[in-house]
Amino acid sequence: MKSTLGFFLLWILGACVTINIYFPEAAAEKAADRIIQDILSSSSRGGGSSGRPLEGEGGEGSKAGGGSGLLLLPVAYAQEADLDIASPAISKIRASLKARYPRLEPYFRSGALGLTQGGLVAIRDLQAIPLRERRAVRELVAEENLDRSALYREIARANGRPEWEENIRQIFARRWVANAPKGWWYQDREGRWKQK
Amino acid sequence: MRAGRFVCGFWLLLVLLLGQGAWSFPSTSSRELRLYLDEVRGRGWQVRGVEVKLLWEAEDQVGFKLSVSHLRLPPPLDSFKGMEVECPRALVRRDGFECFRGVLRLKTPLLGPAPVKASFRYRHPLRRLDFSFKGIALARGRLDLKGWWGPEDWKLGIKAHALELAQLLSSLAYFWPGAAPDPRAFVASGKLWLQGFLWGKGGRLLKAELGGSLKETRFTDQEGLWAGEHLVAAFALKTQKQVRGWEVQADLALKRGELYIDPVYLEVEEDPIRVGFKALWRPQGGMLQVSSFCWHHPGILAAQGRVSLDLQKGARVLLASLKVESSPFSLLYPVYLQPFLAGSALGSLAGRGDVSLDLHYEPGKKSFLEILLKSVDLEDQRGRYGIRGLEGRWFWTNARPVPSRLSWKEGHVYRLALGAGELLLQAYGSEIRLLQKAAFPVLDGTLQIHSFTLKNPGSPEVEWEFEGLLTPVSMEALSRALDWPILSGKVSGVIPRVTYARGRVRVEGVLEVQIFGGTVRVRNLRLEQPFGLVPKLYADMDLDLLDLETLTERFAFGRIQGKLSGKVHGLYLEDWQAVSFDARFYTPQGDRSPHRISQKAVDNLVASLGGMRGVLSRSFLRFFEEFSYDRLSLSCRLRNGICEMGGLEAAQNGYYIVKGKGLPRVNIVGYTRRVRWESLLERLREVAR
């Protein structure tokens, strides 16, 4: 009898554990790719201007805004939803990341900087940076990481799901590496540096 | 001591070998003696193939050669694999021997193969050995040693010429592992010139005076946080053993090159940076007392002070004092201040003026910090704030409080202009407090500060609190400053309490805005990260009896007469842009003022809500300038960039925005429930243009 009751309780607990909060991974990847590719397109050689407003964000953003409302709908519909990346905070952070990128890019290329497993930037080899630039690079990396963390937090927030921050960070960590040019360094799951 | 004994033994051996011959040998013919030892060994050492060759030239003159083909010595001498001493003309007497112009060859990978010019003289009664070795091929350079060794003391003169630092460090690591840095953690290269003397007794060093220079030197620690390149420097070091420790005096002139001492970067091109200190080091108590130090960076910084450290407990500061002479802020800030302020609100300044500083820190006793500011102008490079004509004396202490006085001529926060002001403050412990009520102009009004307290400045737990009063600021000045359409009216308010903690500014109390003949009250005003990348603002606003006529005239919207009340609750701005709110504007109940709306206003209202223009002008209604209305109302609930619109009451498939009265009657009915906020703003901007 007791064991039956115990089994029943376990079953209930088990059932509770399987309740899953749905995270729209495909949509998040799509959003991450859009943001990352937009930032990477402003390379120092391309001379992309940072002050330029983000193209086509408004229109798509409003659709995305509607989409986030759809997140409350059944899963079948939510699958097709985009992630909302159009809040003023996200736009401001994206512009800031984009403006900084041409200054970071040479150091990614030289291998001084690398992409971390947590979706941030780390100094891989400070010695590869000339002395006069070291402080500036350390500051740039600190600012970049503040912005990146804020971006992941704001995307989760703009979609009304602050608890998604970590999932979004993980998605971005993967997509930064996937979108990075050849020759850049990144950390694998064990935190070891590898070159793309 | 051991070396002394060896020399003494060597001399005895010579005397024995020479035997009585030393006193009675034929003056005409020379004699030669060869001695060969196959192997001699002791505990930890072994000598093989020892050959001694003696050749009598005259009565007391002998040529000798000592060679050892294989040496095995205990560490740290184990790199010496063989040696040869040759002395073509040695003088041997009862009281000692002398060797001039001898040659010494040492077989070791640490030294080059070039022979060393060796001269030495041993005097037995004094048991003193004088020596001179010239041309030791050390570290790809040349080393000359000269000095004496006696039972009472010894002296060693050193002259080093162009030694390669990398090689020198590895040789040093070999002979004296404790003294050289770990080659994995510290790498250096470059050339060293050194000259000076060491004095000592037995195996102990008692005094040293060394001077030298470094050229084309680079060094780095493992992470690259401490590094130098292309360095040219001169240094002098004096140290002397005292009863309780060591007295050390060191001076360094950095003449050229780059230095990175995280986070400070220094580059010297012309005038050298001079650094020096005088200290007493007590190894037993682990105490380092720097009785004076100075740092002189020409034109930028002249600092001096003293410091006492307890090195036993991880370099605990027992006392520190620092005086910085008046320095130009524009040069001081980028080199010595900005690196430490990066990321803070003070992290990107441009400025000018003079700053001087006096710091005394003594844990458990009186400590103070005094900063003097002379005509300082500061401007945040991100445009967040600026201040001009800053003067004063800032005094902080943990003992009896002393007032500080700061004044400025003008300033701004974002685009809000501030006038001249003066603050009388008291900085004590971890708290800064306003001592006297202060007031300074904000735009065309005045901000009165009744109280202000700042706690834990410079730490993440920084908090401040202030109470004050804002005397009316004209909306005209405010809207100009904020680049809004020019509005009339006034902002004023009692500010019972504004607090800041954990990156949030909270305004307790009501900010009252007298505008368009009515009142807007702002409550629950909260600002997050006001100086961050994305400032966030939260507020609830209530509008009371605004005069629509004044409002519509202002914007050339077309005349509407009547009163307007409303609310904008849950207002949330990111980067000063609306993200969400619940807004409703309506004709207040019992409003007895005339309710009229002009044809242009109807047209603009319709257009701004996305309707067709010119509906009225295409009908007979074009002959009427104005229409009466009963009530009007419009609401918008903004979420995710979409405005959920609403009005007075439901109409067929829509909602009434304006309900007409009398004849001809005009009703405005909205049909679109969901409007993009951006398009709505765009249309309003166009209409107001």
Image (cartoon, coloured by chain):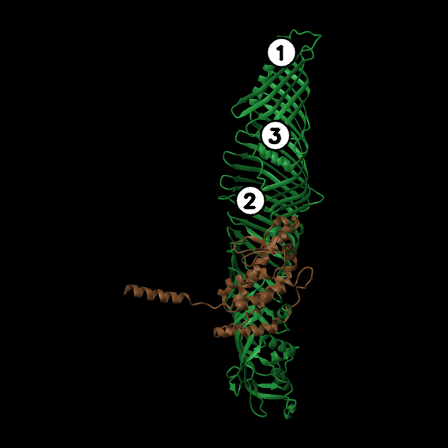
Chain colours: A brown, B green
Q: Secondary structure at mark 3?
A: strand
Whichever of labels 2 and 3 marks the residue nearer the N terminus, that label is: 3
| Residue B439 spot, x, y in % from top left | 58, 61
Q: Mark 2: which amino acid? A: His
Residue at image position (59%, 32%) is: B239
Residue at image mark 3: B208
User: Closer to us: mark 1 or mark 3?
Assistant: 1
Disc sitting over residue B18 in the figure = 1
Q: Secondary structure at mark 1?
A: helix
Query: Is residue B402 found left or right of B96 in the rendered image?
Result: left
| Residue B36 spot, x, y in % from top left | 61, 17
Q: Mark 1: which amino acid? A: Leu
Q: Are marks 1 and 3 on the same chain?
A: yes
Host chain of mark 2: B
Residue at image mark 2: B360
For the residues labelled 2 and 3, the Cα–Cα distance comes to 32 Å
Whichever of labels 1 and 3 marks the residue nearer the N terminus, that label is: 1
Above or below, comparing residue B77 to residue B538 in the picture: above
User: Closer to us: mark 1 or mark 2?
Assistant: 1
User: Closer to us: mark 2 or mark 3?
Assistant: 3
Q: Secondary structure at mark 2?
A: strand
| Residue B60 spot, x, y in % from top left | 67, 11
Circles 1 and 3: CB distance less than 8 Å?
Answer: no
